[in-house]
Amino acid sequence: MDIYRNTYQPVAALDRPRREGDNRTPPSDEAKAPPSQANTDRRRQPDRRRRQEPFDGPDQRQRKTRRRPLLLDPKTAESAPLEDRRGRLLDAKA
C-alpha cells in the first residue's frame, strides 16, 4: 500500500472497515432551545456614555497666541495670520 503525503486520514483509519449507520440521536419534536441568560459581561454591554451632540454656537475656546508668535510678512513687515500661511508669503530669495 502506498502512503501519499496528501492523505487526509491517518493510515490506521484507512485500514479499518467503514461503519454502517449513524450513532446520532434522532431529532425530537419536543426539543426546545435552552433558556437565554442575561448578558453579564461588561465588555458586551451597550455604551452608556453620552454621545457627543453637535454644537452650533460660537467657539468659546481661547486661542493660544503665546505659544506661536505671529510671523511677519516678508514684503510689508506686518504680522501675517498663521491660518493663511501656505508658502506664498514666504520669500524664497535668500
Image: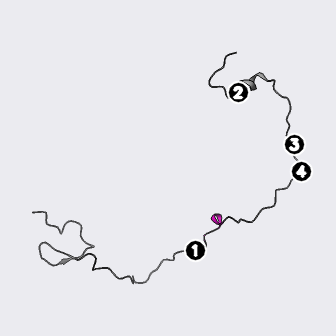
Label 1's element?
A: loop
Query: Which of the two marks, 4 or 1, is nearer to us in this view?
Result: 1
Is 28 left or right of 69, judged from the image as shown? right
Q: Residue furthest left?
A: 94
Question: Is residue 45 magenta-colored?
Answer: yes
- Residue drawn 35% across the image and 82% down it: 62
Task: Return the residue at label 1.
Answer: 49
Q: For this rendering, which residue is in front, 83 or 38?
A: 38
Query: Which of the two marks, 3 or 2, is nearer to us in this view?
Result: 2
Q: For this rendering, which residue is in front, 23 or 30?
A: 23
Q: CA distance from mark 4 to mark 3?
A: 12 Å
Task: Return the residue at label 2.
Answer: 10
Q: CA distance from mark 4 to mark 2?
A: 38 Å
In the image, residue 49 lies at what x, y percent?
58, 74
Disc 4 crowd rating (10 Å Cα; few below 14, some 14-19, many 20+) is: few
Task: Return the residue at label 4.
Answer: 29
